[in-house]
Amino acid sequence: MYIVKQLAATPGVLAAGEYAYHGDHFSYEGALTGEFARIVSILCRVNTLVANMQAEILDSFAEHCGLRPVQGWIVRGTHMSFCAFGNYFAVIDNRTGLLDEVVTQMRQRIGQVRGDLLPGLYARIGGDIDEALY
């Protein structure tokens, strides 16, 4: 939770939190309602699954292309952005330079994401992890 507190204290970060790769467990700090934070945690879990699946497909065509393991993802909107690194997320205002600052903080505090999350994530939604995805 210390990482979440540090991220949430950064000027321009609307909220920061931690989500579970499976299930509905999440925690957060910042200007989100409980329901919106729950939706953000679901969005993070789904986008992490999609990013890992896409990286696996690309890796099957260009082995060792450097996309795996997936470290995180970013969605930039008109007024705010979401970024996730590992199982932590931040909702930020689109101030100039803030996204770089937040991603740098997350990388420094969380470190490298290791391992392959895809089998565990895919199995949780009832997928056959031995089936080829491409």
Image (spheres, rainbow, N blue to C red):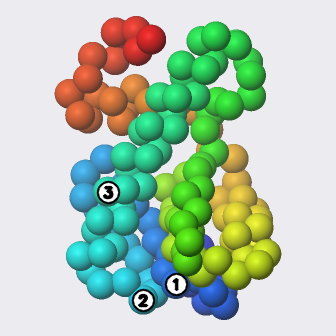
The residue most toward the left is 126
Percent x, y for residue 45? Answer: 38, 50
Is disc 3 placed on a helix, strand or loop? helix
Percent x, y for residue 72? Answer: 60, 49
Tell me which numbered mark, 1 or 2, is placed earlier along the sequence: 1
Is disc 2 placed on a helix, strand or loop? loop
Q: Are marks 1 and 2 in contact (CB under 8 Å)?
A: yes
- Seen from the viewer's position, the closer of residues 109 and 53 is 53
Is disc 1 placed on a helix, strand or loop? strand
Would residue 123 be seen by someone viewing this image from the given angle?
Answer: yes
On the rendered image, what quadrant is the C terminus found in? top left
Examine the image and state in which quarter residue 108 appears.
bottom right
Residue shown at the point (26%, 23%) measured from the top left: 127
The numbered dot on residue 42 is 3
Q: Is residue 128 above or below residue 42?
A: above
Residue shown at the point (74%, 22%) measured from the top left: 65
Percent x, y for residue 68? Answer: 64, 30
Amino acid type, mark 2: Ala
Tell me which numbered mark, 1 or 3, is placed earlier along the sequence: 1
- What separation in Å lies between label 1 and label 3 (alpha carbons)? 18 Å
Count how many numbered circles sit on residues in the image. Answer: 3
| Residue where numbered disc 2 is placed | 31
The numbered dot on residue 14 is 1
Q: Is residue 25 above or below residue 28?
A: above
10 Å crowding of disc 1: few (<14), some (14-19), many (20+) = some
Amino acid type, mark 1: Leu
Relative to 85, is 117 on the left or the right?
left
Amino acid type, mark 3: Ile
Relative to 41, is 94 on the left or the right?
right
Residue shown at the point (62%, 33%) measured from the top left: 69
Percent x, y for residue 23? Answer: 25, 51
Examine the image and state in which quarter residue 103 appears.
bottom right
